[in-house]
Image (cartoon, grey):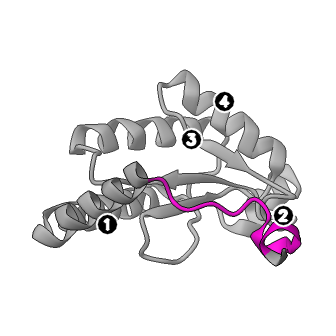
Amino acid sequence: MCRQKARPYLFSNTIAPVVVAGVLRVLDILSSSTERRDKLERNTAFWRKGLEEAGFVLKDGDTPIVPVMLFNAKLSQDFSRDLFAEGIYAIGFFFPVVPQSQARIRTQISAGHEMHHLEKALEAFIKVGKKYNILGKSKQEIIEMYGM
């Protein structure tokens, strides 16, 4: 009776066998070599260094998720749209997805990216950053230019 009526049991199902098989295969691949992780770390370091040297404000960290801080919702939407026009798909995040005045472009690097992909994306980020005159600007300067 509890299994039919109790909340914790409603809509609970086992994981599909194909999902379990997929997860096991991924674990085999990942444990056989550090090649993918090493490439991911190299890609992330290249990407973060390139953005920092270009003058973007980044959230601290060393994960493959590298938030490019813009602090203004409309700016993040416009920046994302202009990146798309350059062939780069990167989403602008703003309130309520992130805290008020913490709007950003969320970039996520993978081991699937080759260096020419990252170089092309970096060129697009720099081009769009120049358009909005935010390169080399501090958080406060960007907020003064575009508001929060």
> Considering the numbered disc 3 on the image, is that residue within a helix, a strand or a loop?
loop
In the depicted view, which residue is nearer to us: 130 or 58? 58
> Considering the numbered disc 4 on the image, is that residue within a helix, a strand or a loop?
helix
In the depicted view, which residue is nearer to us: 143 or 6? 6
In the depicted view, which residue is nearer to us: 112 or 136? 112
**How far apart, in angstroms, are the residues tagged by discs 1 and 2?**
26 Å
Q: Please name the residue that numbered disc 4 is placed on.
A: 81
Q: Which badge, 4 or 1, comes first in the chain's sequence?
A: 1
Q: Please name the residue that numbered disc 2 is placed on.
A: 101
Which mark identifies residue 11? none
Q: Is residue 33 visible?
A: no
Does the magenta segment cover residue 119? no
**How far apart, in angstroms, are the residues tagged by discs 4 and 2?**
19 Å
Q: Please name the residue that numbered disc 1 is placed on.
A: 45
Residue depth check, mark 3 versus mark 4: number of the one nearer the observer: 3
Say whether residue 83 is left or right of residue 8: left
Q: Amino acid at mark 2?
A: Ser
Q: Quadrant of the N terminus?
A: bottom right
Q: Which badge, 2 or 3, comes first in the chain's sequence?
A: 3
Q: Please name the residue that numbered disc 3 is placed on.
A: 90
**How far apart, in angstroms, are the residues tagged by discs 3 and 4?**
9 Å
**How far apart, in angstroms, are the residues tagged by discs 1 and 3?**
18 Å
- The magenta region covers 3-16
Q: Amino acid at mark 4?
A: Arg
